Amino acid sequence: MTRRTVLLEALASTPNDISRLIRPLEGAGWDWVADGDTPSPWHIIAHLITTEKIYQDHISRILERDISDSLPGFQANSSQESHIPIGQLGRDFQQARGQTLQTLQAIGPGDWQRAAHLEPHGRISLRFLMQRLVEHDIEQTGRLVEAIHFRHVVHNNSGFSQ
């Protein structure tokens, strides 16, 4: 397998992992904030969607512009409305990632080497940008697991049932 293939497979697997993790949370207090350091599962999914849109913009800019162009840094504050059920957020993330994958699968191997300047990191190729997205997925999936685990511990210790 090429590194490109590995990146595409990793990117494609995240929405399924997220869906599997949040399925038991639907209708079960998904907006509950775990603690000061751990956002709620809902906020993590909303963050993933917002971040995906930023990456989609960066991919488009890299593919459409000269490599000397500069990409803006990441400001991934969620713009999702809090009344959206977590299951719908999961589906929204899956749809957004599907669009990203469709774009990436349609480009040639040479396009993966196209680059731009990313503030404040400097020159970055599309391949390395996608590696950063995979790393972000891993980080956020880990945060989601922690938030869900914390929620289970709190509910089990307080006598609440799910």
Image (tube, helix red, strand yellow):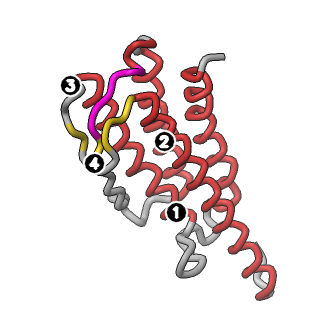
Task: From the viewer's perspective, tell me whether residue 162 is left or right of residue 90.
Answer: right
Q: Earlier in the sequence, mark 3 or mark 1?
A: 1
Q: CA distance from mark 3 to mark 4?
A: 16 Å
Residue at image mark 2: 133
Q: Which residue, given by chain and number where applicable, does mark 4 sit on?
A: 119
- Which segment did they paint magenta? 112-117
In the image, which is nearer the foreground, mark 3 or mark 1? 3
Label 3 element class: loop
Q: Are marks 2 and 4 in contact (CB under 8 Å)?
A: no
**Front-most of 66 and 77?**
66
Residue that lies at the very extreme toward the front in this rendered image? 122
Q: Which mark is residue 42?
A: 1
> What residue is drawn where x is 21% and y is 39%?
70
CA gap, disc 2 and disc 1: 20 Å
Mark 1: which amino acid? Trp
Tag shown at residue 65: 3
